[in-house]
Amino acid sequence: PLPTVAIVGRPNVGKSTLFNRLVGKRLALVDDRPGVTRDRREGEAELIGLKFRVVDTAGFEDEDPETLPGRMRQQTEAAVRGADVALFLIDSRAGVTPLDEEIARWLREQDTPVALAANKAEGRAGDSGVLEAFALGFGDPAPISAEHGEGIADLFEALLPHL
Ligand code: GDP
Ligand code: MG
């Protein structure tokens, strides 16, 4: 069986955009509105010859109790526990937010290893956010742009030790 990568992070950091780029099909719904990815999505990815399963999660995107946040959080927890590595995505333009820190605390309590990537890093707009992300304690963040397909080599290096 292929190793599994679970993409986790707060709303709008670009998880589904990255999922779509890795899988190469429009399997996950991408939208500006938080919480729009309702279901766990899985697909097969290939990165510089490295094959793995990738899971798009949305469990931290819903704080409204009317929208079953508990169920979504459970789905994310299950995806992370079942994965060989959690790919923790932050938005390098927004920097590290309190919710990023909450997710980081939760990830540290899990047994699944974590690889950190700072998305939206095209151009220079994300430079300070990439630096800030070091403080999360998951090592060197891979600067990437899911939308523009940049940082593939850095992403590969971040994932490789865990796959
Ligand atoms: P999710 O909520 O984490 O799944 O985030 P989405 O994949 O739905 O993306 C949220 C927004 O960020 C969308 O408007 C995307 O087009 C945008 N986005 C995703 N990746 C990038 C990127 O690399 N650069 C920029 N500038 N925007 C991005
Ligand atoms: Mg999404």
Image (cartoon, rainbow, N blue to C red):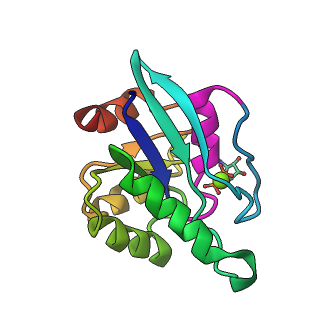
Which span is picked out in magenta? 10-25
Front-most of 127 and 94?
Answer: 94
Q: Is residue 66 left or right of residue 69?
A: right
Residue extending farthest bottom: 65
Q: Residue at x 38, y 46 (%)?
A: 83
Taking depth in this image into account, of 85 and 94 the one nearest to the observer is: 85
User: Does residue 106 appear anywhere in the picture?
Assistant: yes
Is residue 14 in the magenta section? yes
Q: How many marks?
A: 0
Out of 7 and 122, give the one closest to the viewer.
7
Name the residue rendered at 74%, 59% in the picture.
36
Q: Is residue 153 above or below residue 83?
A: above
Res. 148 in view: no
Residue 68: quarter of image: bottom right
Residue 18, magenta (yes or no): yes
In this picture, is 53 found above or below 95? above
Q: Quadrant of the C terminus?
A: top left
Residue 117 x/y as whole percent: 41, 47
- Identify the image quadrant of residue 38: bottom right
Task: Indicate the quadrant where residue 50 lies.
Answer: top left
Q: Quadrant of the N terminus?
A: top left
Which percent across, then down, holds residue 157?
30, 32
Residue 46: percent from left, percent from top: 48, 22
Q: Position of residue 162 (x, y in %)?
A: 26, 38
Which residue lies at the image location 23% right of the left edge and 35% below the top edge?
A: 161
